[in-house]
Every structure is written in structure tokens, then in C-alpha cells.
Amino acid sequence: MKQFTLAPLFGAIALVSTQFATAQGNQSFDGSLELEQRVFTHRLDDAGDANRGQTSLRLQMEYFRDWNNGSDQIVLEPFVRIDSDDEARSHLDLRQFLYSKIYDNAELSVGLGRVFWGVTESQHLVDIINQTDGVENIDGEDKLGQPMIRYTYFADFGTLEAFALPYFRPRTLAGKDSRLNGGLMVRDDVEHYEASSGTSHFDYAVRYKNTFGDWDLGLSWFDGTSRDPDLRRFANPLTGATEAYYAQITQVGLDLQLTTGAWLYKLEAIQRDFDDASYASYSAATVGTEYTLVGILNSVYDLSLLAEYAWDERDAPLDTVFQNDLFVGARLALNDMADSQILFGVSNDLDETDSRAWFVEGSTRIGTATTLNIEARIFDAESPSDPLSRFDQHSFIQVGLEYFFD
């Protein structure tokens, strides 16, 4: 099981929590335990049925405490997954271990934290603070805790955020036993960095956000180690063995959302530049809309229709799967006592028109403390030039039973 150590940072937060442990305040503790079963729809020629099924257990907890009338806060969020077949997917992490001091018009946070930027559904171009937990799922939605010092200033002209990121965390990647490794055997004990300081390179970011009437605006700047590993630079095309390389980048990001009645209009756009001259600068954008039908067919159901277009200046399909893609989907909320909902969609490559990725995500509560989660991902791509083709034989259906406690 992989672990990471950030002893000095943890020590500082533990010292803060110890000093204030006896102070009067509020605290809460909750979490969930999920048993998950994943079944792949295709049998592999060289593996038979041996790894068509994959069972795992996930535990996630959160402890929160505040004192001094809420001006001091600490949150601790450990995460553990144990997987039956993929050793790399069995891992533990601290999603958050963050102390925050709240002032009249500012907030200072120190520790491991998570930050999300973005508005679109199919991909999150501007979201760059946290590293992707690549063994959790193929959709890139899960993030590792990021060591940070975060200062937020609230003013009449908007909110300014500054991030000091003193430690880089490499992406967790599917192991050799995983059906979702894309045919790559990535060494998890070796990474290469453009920066001579490696994981200790000091990254930083700033962001401005504000609301202007119906418009929500976010502008961001990041300078530091790219969260996206280059897995081709050290790849052996004969064996599929490779090692991750992380370049130094600067990224300017824009996220924009217009809310007007039942319509949402969304945009995320980035410009990314590299210090390494072997990489070309590029721009990318995702634009889309969402329309919500409230009470369809005289029922209590709400149906949201989604459509997005993704463009990337890098025309080579091996650089990204979103270079010229159309996404359509729908989100159905039943508004029942079980809080049942389902989201489904499909991305279609407009260059490789026979390349599609379908997904379904749904959940409903059983009883008072248990939720049934369902997920399916269907990959349909045959052209060798399409990176999605590496997953063509690895479509899967996943069912999870999640118990919540406090």
C-alpha cells in the first residue's frame, strides 16, 4: 500500500489542534464505508475470466472542529481503499488536514487541502491545484490532498485567492494488474522532473472570482509543476514500460458561467506555456449549455439537458482525448425520499467519428443510512491513432453499497 509522508506539515497542524483542543467549540464526525464491485464486459484473451471482476472497499471519514466562535477551524479527512486485484489502487491518503483562521474579510489556511475550479461537466480544464488520484477512477474527478498555504481576501470588487504550494504530489496511476492502465506499465517508484528540486519545487497560483449580475467569473494563474505527467517521453514502445515526466508550466485560466432562467451557459479556457522547449504552448477550451426542465410530465422529476464542445489546439490525438469532441448528456433528479438521481452522457470524437465514450452514474438511498451507487463506462474506439482505443476492451459496470455513519 502506498503512503506519503509530510511529517513537518502534519506536525504543525497537530500542534495547532493540540493547543486549542481544550477550547470550547463545535465538532462533528462523519464518514462512509462502501463495498464496490466492478465487472468488465469483455474477456481478455490472455487472462480469461480471472480479472473480469474487481472488488474493493473504501472508507472515508471527516472530523471538523471550530473554536473561538468559529474563527479557528480544523478539518481532517482520511481516505482508504483496498482493492482485490489492483495493488496500485489499494492506497491511503489524507484528502484534507487543514487548519483555517478566519478574519473579518480574509481567511488563512495551512495544511493539506482540496480546491475545485471550473463549471463544465465533461472535463475541468482550469482545475489545477490538486493532483488527480488516477487509480480511483478514469474520469479524473478524484483528487489527492495538496500541501498548501492559502490566503483568501474578500472585498467589494471580488474575491482574491493566493496559493503557495511547497510540495508536489505525483499522480497515482493504474498499476500493471489494472484493466484500466491503457496498456502502459508505469513505474510508480521513479518520476522525472524538469525542475532540479523535483517534488520540492515551489509552485504558486492566484485566482480572482466575482459575480456580475447573472455572470460568474473566475480568472486564474498557475506557475509550477504540471499536474499532467508525460508518459510518452520515457516509454518503451515494445514493452509498454514507461516512467512519468513532469514539466514546468505556466497556465492562465478563465471560467465563466451565465445563469438566465432555466439556462446555464458555461465556458472554461486555458493557455498553457512550457519552460521545456520540446513542448509547444497550446490553448484549449470547453463551451457548453445546460437547460433544466422542472416537473416534467406533471411530475416532481427535474430533467437537465447538457451539451458541451471541447477543443484543444494540440491536433495530435495522443496528446488529449478532447481535441475536437462533442458531449451530450442528461441529469434526472426524482426528488423522492431516497434522493434518487441519475446522470448519463456520451462524448463523441468529431475527427474519429466512430470513437465514443458512454457513461451512467446513479444513486438512491436504501433505508436511512445506506446508498446504492451504480456506474457504467462504455468505450467504443477501434482506430489505433485514437487514445480511447486503449480502453476499447475494458468497458465496465460498477455497483457500490455505501453506508454512512456519524
Image (cartoon, rainbow, N blue to C red):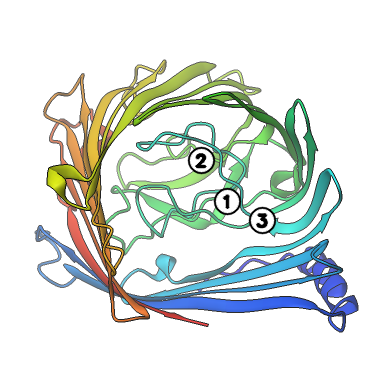
Q: Is residue 55 left or right of residue 196?
A: left
Residue 95: horizontal and vertical position, in percent?
59, 62
Image height of 137 relative to 320, above or below: below
Q: Quadrant of residue 390?
A: top left
Q: Nearer the viewer, residue 340 or 7?
A: 340
On residue 113, the disc is 3
Numbered disc 2: secondary structure: loop
Q: Which residue is mark 2?
A: 229
Between the residue at mark 2 and the residue at mark 3, the CA separation in whole angstroms equals 21 Å
Between the residue at mark 1 and the residue at mark 3, the CA separation in whole angstroms equals 16 Å
Residue drawn at x 41%, y 40% is: 235
Q: Which residue is mark 1?
A: 170
Res 322 seen here: no
| Mark 2 crowd level (few <14, some 14–19, many ≥20, 10 Å Cα) | some
Residue drawn at x 74%, y 51% is: 148
Q: How many marks?
A: 3
Numbered disc 1: secondary structure: loop
Q: Is residue 18 left or right of residue 97?
A: right
Residue 346: horizontal and vertical position, in percent?
20, 38
Residue 318: horizontal and vertical position, in percent?
34, 29
Image height of 95 relative to 257, above or below: below
Image height of 61 relative to 22, above or below: above
